[in-house]
Image: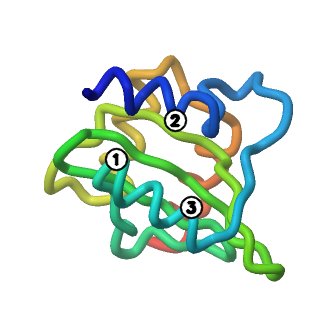
Amino acid sequence: MKRTIALVLAAFIPATAASADPVCMLAAEMEAALIDWYAEAPVEGAWVDAQQLWASETTGTWTLMELNGDGTACVLSQGDNWQAGDDALIALGRSLESQDGGSASAIAFLDMLQADAS
């Protein structure tokens, strides 16, 4: 079952920073997909400008999305190894380390979160 979900989502969410264009859809559809497919929810305190981090303590996945003024949302980055109960900065940093640094979008978002925290 998990493999099927992963294969379906692979068609919608870029697997690497090298993917050509971000996947965009209506924000409500994006949020429903993150909730239904990955059991993700918005991470408290992980919202900077129009970028929002979602994660699941159950599946260990996370998604960084950008909300646009036209009602759409785009996936900027995604990954796994989210640790249950961690602070957003720690959890995202740990996940990016396990992915050989992560995408430029996720690293920039982490930098913005760190700047807001200080």
Q: Secondary structure at mark 2?
A: helix
Q: Is residue 45 above or below residue 76?
A: below
- Image spot of residue 51 (x, y percent): 63, 66
Identify the residue under disc 2: 9
Say if mark 2 contacts mark 1, CB within 8 Å.
yes
- Does the rendering let one see residue 107? no
Q: Is residue 46 above or below residue 107?
A: below
Q: Amino acid at mark 3?
A: Met
Q: Which mark is residue 38?
A: 1
Q: Residue at x 76, y 43 (%)?
A: 22
- Does the rendering let one see residue 23? yes
Q: Secondary structure at mark 3?
A: helix
Q: CA–CA distance between discs 3 and 1?
A: 11 Å
- Image spot of residue 80 (x, y percent): 37, 33
Q: Residue at x 61, y 38 (%)?
A: 13
Q: Which mark is residue 30?
A: 3
Q: Secondary structure at mark 1?
A: helix
